Amino acid sequence: MSVTIQDVAKAAGVTVGTVSRALNNYADVNENTRQRIIRTAREMGYHPNLIARSLSSKHARRIALIVSGFLEDKMFNHFETMLMKGCYQFAQEWGVELSMHMINSEIQRQKSYEQLCHEHNLSGAVLLGLKTTDPYCDGFPAGSPPCVTIDTQVKGPNVSNVTLDHIAAFDELTQYLIDQGHRRIVLVHGRKEAMVSMERLAGAHQAMTRNGLPLTHDQIIYTNFLREEAYAGVRRYLETHDSHSVTAFLCMSDMLAIGTIEAIKSLGYKVPRDYSVVGYDGLDVTEFTDPRITTIDQNIRLKGYEAAHLLLDMLDGKRPTQRLVLPHTLSIKDSVAPPAL
């Protein structure tokens, strides 16, 4: 038998009206009471978002996850999926109505963020997948609905950003390779116009300069964060350069690291015996590659969760606009070894 709102009210020791108001984020509900009701509902298996759909209150928060480049961008992968799961996990736990909308650069040119929110009756949105060349990156004017961007920063008085310190994280990853004895490092670059690529490149430059090592154009293989492009680029590099010109490949994503390992193996070499490889993201798939990939773990699901959390707090006046920088972890696995003499 399914759990009803009356069951939740009885278990929480409050009225049915209080449950409804708490799950729909009315400001007149004590925060401790709200948290007790949410916890009770979750423990009983009650899904509060069903109430949000059934009510037409003007106080209901309607937020969205707006994803740019979903259909035309081949780079869409586990990273974006985990971010989505984080957003939806928050929405489910807090009884918030969350929709999803797909856009691209052309739609951004035709329709402002404010228009998009007005058409879909949105109180605010989390924006994912923006490129630095996208129209929305020019900024949002005052009066636009609150917005939280993931990684890519957008100017505006109502815009927050959730990100990592990608410069520091990639510096740490590069330094790890150097500390293992690697001096001939090739960088497998992501998409040139992506803000995260620019920041990670800065981190690599920072670490290599500090250690007196060069990072020349010939040491960079450009991709669009596509595994197949990493495979082709790394294979081409190894075929056209002396085998001792590189001892480690520093990849801007885990998927690029996977493509790199495939290329190395296709030429009869082994990882990490012949070449070391590191990635970036912390995707679950790195636990099942051969070898398991040393990477920077972004805790991607948390990033999506915290983006939705920050947006709701902005809407409720609990937090101001801000740049929220989340922690990262260097996850050491099996894909790095000291270079052979």
Image: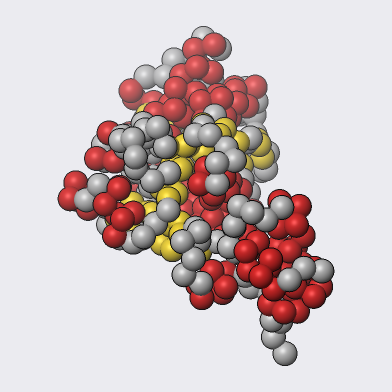
- Residue at 62% in and 64% down: 21
Quarter residue 154 falls in: top left
Residue 202: x and y in percent read 44, 22
- Looking at the image, residue 312 sits to the left or right of residue 219; the answer is right
Picture quarter with the N terminus: bottom right
Quarter residue 317 falls in: top right
Vertical position of residue 9 compared to residue 249: above or below: below
Name the one closer to the observer, 279 or 267. Answer: 279
- Quick check: can you spot residue 31? yes
Residue 144: x and y in percent read 34, 42
Residue 75: x and y in percent read 37, 52
Vertical position of residue 156 compared to residue 49: above or below: above
Picture quarter with the C terminus: top right
Residue 162: x and y in percent read 51, 38
- Residue at 41% in and 62% down: 100
- Residue at 49% in and 12% down: 209
